[in-house]
Amino acid sequence: MKKSIDLSTLTAAVHLIAVLSVLCFGTVFATAGVLTLPALCAAFTVGKDVFYHRFDVYDSLTKRYFSLLGEHMGMMKFFPLQLVFFLQLLGLYAAGKMKMSILIYVLTAGAAFILTLTVYLAACRVFMEEKPDIVRTAVVMFYRVQNMLAVWVAMILSVMLFGAAFCGIMLIAGTVFLLAVEGAAAMAVLSFKKATVGLGPEDEDSLGEAVINKL
């Protein structure tokens, strides 16, 4: 029986990683980054199901993802933030051509910070409130600096490694990266939520006492 359970768990994990990676990063790359926030929110909602132990491998993940993508289209109001990110990437390309090392470092850090803020916007949307705003999200980010730094470092690596090979890896197994980043951001969001408005019944029932005590 134990082997059967382990095999079932492994199958569910492989299914989640493979399908969600293609769906989320496929959406991002196919739209040239335009739908990054809705795609991230949809993936984070599925990730929340995993964290809260209610992910059902027998449900149609593809159907659920695109349904969630539609639900989170309101996050497109933050598209100007993505435009800033695109401009920073253009600046990075130009700085690289001109071999301006200091500017490359500054723009890499800045682009990674925009991505970090994007991750926290998605986490706030999924774990705390319907309509997050940038100011409140920034407060949440710095509420637990260690979590923010972890996400920021991950985003720095993403910017530095971005290329055809990196995109290929994300399409195949990007869910692993997504869940790790989401976990760091979610802990900060839930910690802030606990300290301000309090955790809801859903959070308390799903997270368990051990996790709640760490928030």
Image (cartoon, rainbow, N blue to C red):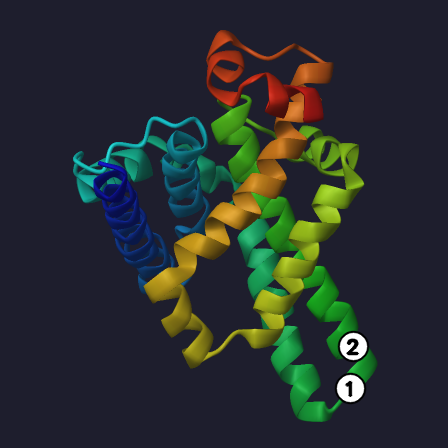
| Residue 73, label in figure | none
Displayed quadrant of residue 123: top right
Quadrant housing the N terminus: top left
64 or 18, nearer to the observer: 18
Which residue is label 2 attached to?
Answer: 103
Q: Is residue 94 visible?
A: yes
Instruction: State the image coordinates of residue 15 (x, y, percent, origin top left).
Output: 25, 50
| Distance CA(mark 2)–CA(mark 1) | 6 Å
Report if the CB atoms under discs 2 and 1 are less than 8 Å apart: yes
What residue occupies the far right of the structure in this picture?
Answer: 102
The quarter of the rendered structure image containing the C terminus is: top right
Percent of width and height locating residue 93: 61, 81
Q: What residue type is labelled 2?
A: Leu
Indicate left or right for 12 with 164 as reference. Answer: left
User: Mark 1 is on which residue type?
Assistant: Met
Is label 1 in a helix, a strand or a loop? Answer: loop
Residue at image position (38%, 62%) is 173
In this orientation, which residue lies closer to the viewer: 45 or 102? 45
- The secondary structure type at the circle numbered 2 is helix
* 88 in relation to 181, above or below: below
Q: Identify the residue at horizontal 52%, vertical 74% (top origin).
A: 162
Q: Mark 1 points at which residue?
A: 100
* Near-viewer residue (174 or 108): 174
Compared to 184, does 127 lie above or below? above
In this rendering, is residue 89 above or below 164?
A: above
Where's residue 25, x and y in %?
A: 37, 58
Q: Point out residue 65 in the picture as x, y percentages from the top left corner.
A: 27, 40
Density class for disc 1 (Cα within 10 Å; few <14, some 14-19, many ≥20) is few
Q: At 83% across and 79% down in the image, what residue appears?
A: 102
User: In the rendered picture of this protein, how many numbered marks are placed on residues?
Assistant: 2
